[in-house]
Image (cartoon, grey):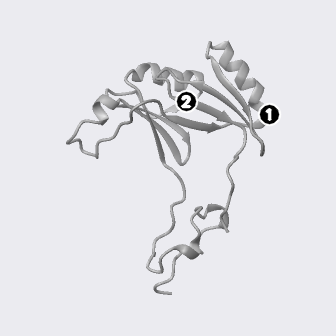
Amino acid sequence: MHGQPVLNKMPASMLPVTNPQTLSLSFQMQPITSILETILYATNLAEMERFYSDILGLSKLGDHTELSAGFRICDTQVLLIFNPEIASTPNRPVPSHGPEGPGHIAFRIQPDDFQAWQDHLVKHGIEIEQLQTWESRGRSIYLRDPANNSIELIDTDIWPDNRS
């Protein structure tokens, strides 16, 4: 069916939020299915590596380098921590990037583990910045990583699913 979007090869649960009816008829590739990399920034990568592996329990992709540290979230997602002083320099093998100020990331946790996570953080001397119960449903624990990024542990998906 030349000229038609190729969206019917994926199960509905994997379709992107984009409404398939609004896609151009020349759109011939499969839609985006997930975010592979999420990036935060910090200058002390050894400290970040300890926090994300020892406190949050993420699996390291390998030892950190001067440029980055990486962690496997699941089969299809990784968290990368880049040193912004290096990542933002021009003429690197990939486009330069780096933010100003703290970033944010939310990790999904199991609802039954909400209190256990609070206890674990307190036990390791991690200050809980805020506890939030959402109107729609779900609860979040907010804390800061060593680079002052806002880290959220959330026990359910609170975002609407408008996929058809």
Figure quadrant of residue 89: top left
Q: Percent from the top left, x then y, of residue 123?
A: 68, 13
Dot 2: what SS?
A: strand
Kindly identify the residue that appears in the image at 45 percent across and 75 percent down: 27
Mark 2, Cα crowd under 10 Å, few <14 / some 14-19 / many 20+, is some
Q: Residue furthest bottom?
A: 1
Mark 1, Cα crowd under 10 Å, few <14 / some 14-19 / many 20+, is few
Residue that numbered label 2 is attached to: 150
Q: Is residue 7 above or below residue 75?
A: below
Kindly identify the residue that appears in the image at 31 percent across and 26 percent down: 66
Q: Which mark is residue 152?
A: none
- 161 left or right of 79? right
* Amino acid type of the residue tagged 2 in the rendering: Ser
First along the sequence among labels 1 and 2: 1
Q: Residue furthest left?
A: 91
Figure quadrant of residue 26: bottom left
Q: Percent from the top left, x then y, of residue 104?
A: 53, 35
- 70 left or right of 58? left
* Amino acid type of the residue tagged 1 in the rendering: Asp
Q: In this rendered view, identify the residue nearer to me: 105 or 74.
A: 105
Figure quadrant of residue 39: top left
Kindly identify the residue that appears in the image at 77 percent across and 46 percent down: 136
Q: CA distance from mark 1 to mark 2?
A: 23 Å
Kindly identify the residue that appears in the image at 51 percent across and 82 percent down: 4
Q: In this rendered view, identify the residue nearer to me: 133 or 48.
A: 133
**Which one is closest to the eye, mark 1 or mark 2?**
2
Q: Percent from the top left, x then y, of residue 47?
A: 45, 19
Q: Is residue 35 above or below residue 154?
A: below
Count the marks: 2
- 82 left or right of 113? left
Residue that numbered label 1 is attached to: 112
